[in-house]
Image (cartoon, helix red, strand yellow):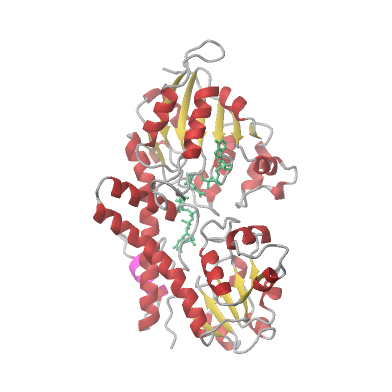
Amino acid sequence: MFNNKIKNICCIGAGYVGGPTMAVFANHCLNIKITVSDINEKRINAWNDSDISNLPIYEPGLDTLISRSRNKNLFFTTNIKESIAEADLIFLSVNTPTKSKGIGAGKASDLKWVEASARQIAKFSRGHTIVVEKSTLPVRTAKTIEKILSESQEIDENQEKKTFSVLSNPEFLSEGNAINDLERPDRVLIGGEDQSAINLLVDLYLNWVPREKIILTNIWSSELSKLTANAFLAQRISSINAISSLCEATGADIKQVSKAIGMDTRIGNKFLLPGPGFGGSCFQKDILNLVYLCEYYNLHEVAAYWEGVININNWQKDRIFKLIVIKLFGTVFEKKLAILGFSFKANTNDTRNSASIQICKNLIEEGAILSIYDPKVGSNQIDEDLNLPFHKTNSKKNMQWTKTDSIQSAIKDCHAIIILTEWDEFQKIQWESLIKKMKRPAWIFDTRSVVDVSKAEQAGFNVWQIGNYTS
Ligand code: NAD
Ligand code: UGA
């Protein structure tokens, strides 16, 4: 049993979850020392950069929180050993991507970073340590962590017996809105059995979260609820995207259909925006993980049901790419096309699994020359994501795509503008001024419903908008 208050927290993993989450904890738990540790030195250096605009993650409001608490009660370090040793409570916030090879490749979560972290905790911790799963994990991962911890060396450096409590406390933040989600969560979910450890974690959250928003469950329900929440959210997007294609074929308007169904309180109006297909680091990987679990438990119909959500998502990206080519007279060979938006959604610099990646790759494969503009994504990231066979030294690469610093320079001499992310500035574009710099006929392909179609048409554009009938 462990009855002391928490004085030191360590978070292993300084990524999109670890960084913002600990920034919010630090701002609400002023008497607790919080250390975020990571093996990635470059990332840690960026978190410690005195120029706050160089933080490794772009998230509205994050810079203010970091400026307030960094080097006061919030620290970023690569010294994992020390941060584990002094911690009463450790959040595991490491990456859990889909396995790329071996058993379960393409579906199962790769838990090697979770296991490595558990082994580090087993080795370096002292006394009693509460280990909290923040990463999204397959059901029953807590058992693996417990096994690794319980079979660790039993005595710490101070000759005290090492003990552990494992809790699950999945994170539901959504990127671009992370600070708001963390400050005012819909719910905080804690799964576990050790009541005193649960109470200590609840007490931490009570610094800013009302008690009625904190839900306690058994550990397996907590792990499965996280996968299920993401699967349901992604399912809504695939549903609305599927209907968007039917709208385009029939003359129904997806905005009107979304409004009509969303006003039914049983359906609700959120997550009904059609798009080029969901991206981000988690929806696809978490559904694939769910599919893998179902197959493992011989629930093949259930696995196939959830796999359908991914299939529609892939189909959406593919159909958008194909319709662009078809509308541009069946060929984009050596045509310059402007890509507006590369991140997987607005207000983040994250491009993981962004629909833009697949759509851009396919267009390049067809011979198009892309000029890409995104307010937060840099050319190194785009280069890494597109992963084209040409190397930097090969001048041919520059024929395939360039990154521009403004919308104006992106669209110059283009045949079409393809909007793939819903950045605010794309909604404010004055179309009359742009068309003069483009090749005619000039097209807009709006996959995010941000364009006022009648204004763009008045300016002389041909417009295709998702979920809108065009002859
Ligand atoms: P990320 O890749 O941005 O960050 C993970 C970090 O962990 C990396 O910086 C990596 O270097 C570090 N790391 C890996 N192994 C380590 C080790 N042994 N010791 C120290 N550091 C180590 O990932 P993320 O987006 O922050 O996601 C983390 C987890 O949270 C995943 O399981 C994800 O599914 C889940 N999640 C993510 C989001 C999101 O919006 N990104 C939201 C909710 C939940
Ligand atoms: C999602 C969930 O919303 C979070 O609750 C969860 O914690 C997180 O995954 C995770 O586990 O990583 P995130 O991926 O950051 O958050 O962003 P979302 O807002 O969910 O958007 C995901 C994708 O769906 C984006 O590409 C977005 O453009 C797309 N989307 C979203 C739509 O196409 N339509 C919508 O109506 C909503």
Return the residue nearer the eye: 463 or 358: 358
* Residue nearer the viewer, 430 or 149: 149
- Name the spot of residue 146 as percent of width and height, x first: 40, 28
Reply yes or no: does residue 260 show up in magenta. Answer: yes
Image spot of residue 40 (x, y percent): 63, 41
Quadrant, the C terminus: bottom left
Query: What residue sits 31% from the left and 64% below the top?
Result: 264
Question: Residue pushed farthest top?
Answer: 159
Does the rendering let one see residue 268?
no
In this rendering, does residue 62 appear at all? yes
The percent coordinates of residue 170 (x first, y second) are 43, 41
* Relative height, residue 240 to residue 157 (above, below): below
Q: Nearer the viewer, residue 107 or 222?
A: 107
Location of residue 343 (image quadrant): bottom right
236 shown above or below 148 = below
- Residue found at x 70% / y 62%: 392
Q: Residue 155 colored magenta?
A: no
Q: Position of residue 90 (x, y in %)?
A: 51, 30
The residue lying at 68 percent from left, 73 percent from top is 399
Work out whether residue 190 or residue 260 is closer to the camera in this orientation and state it. Answer: 190
Quarter of the picture holding the N terminus: top left
- Give the magenta range: 255-263
- In the drawing, does residue 23 fall left or right of residue 284? right
- Taken as a whole, is the magenta stretch helix, strand or loop? helix
